[in-house]
Image (tube, rainbow, N blue to C red):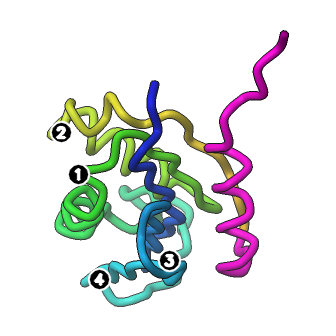
Amino acid sequence: MSNQNPAFIWIDHRVAKVFHANAETSAPSIVHSNHPHQHLHHKANSIDSGHARVDKDFLERVATAVARADAILITGPASAKTELKRHLEDLHPRIAANVTGVQTLDHPSDGQLLAHARRFFEPEPTVR
């Protein structure tokens, strides 16, 4: 696969940082969730799971931000990364086909994120 336009996403339930390798700047595009940050606790004998509901509008805006990428790496600390992948598979199969990896990353700096993305998308050395 030719990775001429790769995108790298770090996502949690509040914010997504989207880096494009071919961008003029190394600054990410930031996509914010519309849901206010809530720290939910699961209570005994409650019907719900205690987890925040998925902000589908947020996931849709992240999908739009990577729609033109030909290779996509999704990272993040918790379940938002798999929720994004599932959202892409369900509603945007063309974009989902370009997801080349889903990895757990805690809360690295932007510089650490860029270094990780460069290593991930770096072409394999040719063996002679």
Residue at the far bottom in the pictured view: 36
Disc 4 target residue: 35
Whichever of labels 1 and 4 marks the residue nearer the N terminus, that label is: 4
Which-is-in-front pick, marks 2 and 3? 2
Disc 2 target residue: 92
The amino acid type, in three-letter code, at marker 2 is: His
The part of the chain drawn in magenta is 107-128
CA gap between label 1 and label 2 equals: 9 Å
CA gap between label 3 and label 1 equals: 32 Å
Whichever of labels 4 and 3 marks the residue nearer the N terminus, that label is: 4
The percent coordinates of residue 67 (x first, y second) are 23, 51
CA gap between label 4 and label 2 equals: 22 Å
* Crowd rating for badge 1 (residues with CA inside 10 Å; few <14, some 14–19, many 20+): some
Q: Are marks 4 and 2 in contact (CB under 8 Å)?
A: no
Q: Are marks 1 and 2 in contact (CB under 8 Å)?
A: yes
Which-is-in-front pick, marks 1 and 2? 1
